[in-house]
Image: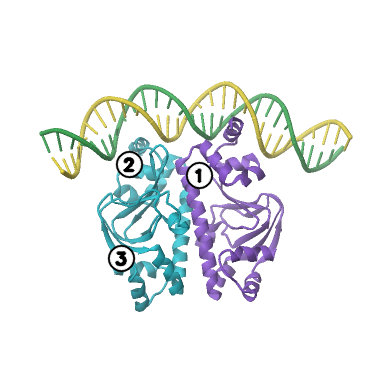
Chain colours: A cyan, B purple, C green, D yellow
Amino acid sequence: MSQQLLSFIQQSIAVSQEEFDLILAYFKPLKLKKNHLLLDYGETSQRIFFITSGCLRIFFINDDGQDATRHFAFENQMATALVSFITREASGEFVQAMEETELLSITHEDFYGLLELLPKWEKFYRCYLEMAYVTSTRRLRSFLTLDSKEKYQQLLQENPRIVQRLPNKMVASYLNISQETLSRLKSKV
Amino acid sequence: MSQQLLSFIQQSIAVSQEEFDLILAYFKPLKLKKNHLLLDYGETSQRIFFITSGCLRIFFINDDGQDATRHFAFENQMATALVSFITREASGEFVQAMEETELLSITHEDFYGLLELLPKWEKFYRCYLEMAYVTSTRRLRSFLTLDSKEKYQQLLQENPRIVQRLPNKMVASYLNISQETLSRLKSKV
DNA sequence: CGAGGCCTTGACCGCGGTCAATGCCCGTGG
DNA sequence: CCACGGGCATTGACCGCGGTCAAGGCCTCG
């Protein structure tokens, strides 16, 4: 598990063994059952998670009680309700385990503490934010320019794992279309 | 003009006069006429801009030739086609001056060079990315959970400047609704 | 074996887009 | 200074994508 985290970090920065030990000390392992809610509406996101196995889902719920999925994160990815994590305000996002999931979690305080302690952690976080921003903007673009069929086809091409691994209901929520529409789309192609 | 940039930087980090002189040396002033296209489709975003007066618009064009506005940036804000700026890939986004606009521009090379030269520039950029991410995700959320009327009302509340200062056509493009729909919405409320 | 959740399919409908006509404002040139 | 033309806003008529509601079948898990 810690090996996975090391590899993930080394995608952005080089760290020595001592530096990694320092970092790792702040991460606590956690094991979740399927459907466990890690963060509820109105709570402030106090931790960021590195997933070693399983899958997390980050989603909104709108006024009618419909949910809209903002993001799926799988093993070897980092995730949280990032807006609340950054702003320290109550979250409009939920975080939930889609499967039995194992992760390493670090608190906001320790994470930002590392930014002071270890200058290269700034770079690590910056790289993470760059990727998160790129992902978010690509997603924004797909909603601004594609119809539901095109969104589904793009998802199949760029992120087939989501379609393969998760129930239709969740895929529909990710594309922001109804389950029925997704079902009809699939039967056509 | 340089005073505006200094204030902007000092919102995230404290800089000495020498540090600011070092930074400022990389920024070149530029004056644009209304409608000038700063970045065209397929070009790679080579510069990031600090606006001292005027307004920039960052937008996509979809297959039917319709445009969808991702962002408006006004005086005392920084902007660019950030995805292309980060990834160094050809941009799917356009950047255009909405009004006569004056700005300070720095190249990608110099901007990333400063990250090495000046450790606190990492923090400045990180804070900028945090804000950009929060803005982008809030916007994503509004598309995932609101209908056109709600989007317009939210815009009126959170960013009235856009409605006051820009033509309807541009406001509609920002909300990703047709000009006609926006016109009907306005006449009702 | 029963119950509940998920997927599929059909019928219906409403939001918002498209097309078209008209009016208004404004910049440009004769 | 006025005449003209082009871009923008408004309004009406129409329509299609995709949502909602409902019924039925299937699979999973207790």
Residue to which mark 3 is pinned: A28
Q: Quadrant of residue A125?
A: bottom left
Q: Secondary structure at mark 3?
A: strand
Residue C12: x and y in percent read 40, 22
Indicate the quadrant where residue A28 lies: bottom left
Asked if residue B88 lies left or right of residue A182, the reply is right
Residue at figure coordinates x 40%, y 74% from the top left: A14
C14 w.r.t. A75: above or below: above
User: Which mark's residue is nearer the viewer, 3 or 2?
Assistant: 3
Residue B31 as seen in the image, left or right of residue A182: right
The chain containing the residue under callout 2 comes to A
What residue sits right under mark 1 in the picture?
A: A144
Left or right: D14 as drawn, with respect to A34? right
Measure the alpha-carbon separation of dots 2 and 1.
Answer: 22 Å
**In the rendered structure, which amino acid carries the disc numbered 2?**
Lys
Q: Relative to B79, is A101 on the left or the right?
A: left
Q: Residue at x 53, y 52 (%)?
A: B92
Let me know if marks 3 and 2 both belong to one chain. yes
Q: Amino acid at mark 3?
A: Lys
How far separated are the C-alphas under marks 3 and 2?
32 Å
Quarter of the picture containing the N terminus of chain A is bottom left
- Quadrant location, the C terminus of chain A: top left
- Circle 2 — which element? helix
Towards the viewer: A126 or A24: A24
> In the rendered image, which quarter is residue C7 located in?
top left
**Residue B113, percent across and down?**
56, 72
Q: Considering depth in this image, is A85 or B114 the residue closer to the camera?
A: A85
Q: Which numbered circle lies on residue A169?
A: 2
Which of label 2 and label 1 is nearer to you? 2
